[in-house]
Amino acid sequence: MIPRASRKCNCYVGAAPGTIWPDTCPATERWDTMEELAKAARAVAAEKKTGLADVAAAFHERGREAGARPTLYCDDKTHLGGPGHLLACQTVLKAIAGGPEGK
């Protein structure tokens, strides 16, 4: 599955080096389901020397905090709520600025 996901990611990474792109974001009911795609995105970004806003890693890190996971989403447990949007935006901004998510 990873080679196929990696090839799919490759289509999106045809941009010039230095481009920042986000990976997938987990949902509460599918917390680890998309991790294989996130790993493939990290591998392709590293191979192409392209910046990556690792939203999946940021959500998994925040989700380890007691009670934090549900606050990231709306009541449907899939779409981002205010705190989830803020976390995603902060992750992208750090990547643009060259922070840990962008390396």
Image (cartoon, rainbow, N blue to C red):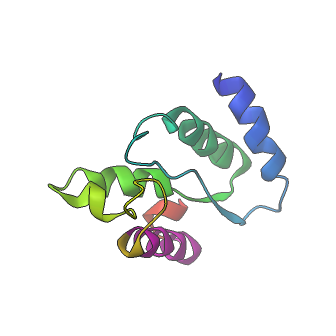
Where does the image place residue 72, in percent across and percent down from the top left? 35, 63
Farthest residue in the top direction? 1
The majority secondary structure of the magenta stretch comes to: helix
At x 42% / y 36%, what residue is drawn? 32
Query: Where residue 88 appears, x then y in whole percent?
Result: 48, 68
In the image, residue 92 lies in the stretch drawn in magenta? yes
Q: Position of residue 8 (x, y in %)?
A: 77, 38
Image quadrant assignment for residue 21: bottom right
Position of residue 7 relative to residue 91, above or below, is above
Residue placed furthest toward the left: 66
For residue 49, side relative to residue 56 (left or right): right
- Residue drawn at (85%, 53%) of the image: 14
Which range of residues does the magenta coloring cover?
84-98
Residue 58, quarter of picture: bottom left
- Number of residue marks: 0
Judged left or right of residue 84, residue 13 is: right
| Residue at figure coordinates x 65%, y 21% from the top left | 1
76 or 69, nearer to the observer: 76
Residue 60 pos. (x, y %): 35, 49
Q: Is residue 2 left or right of residue 15?
A: left
**Residue at position x 74%, y 26% in the image:** 4
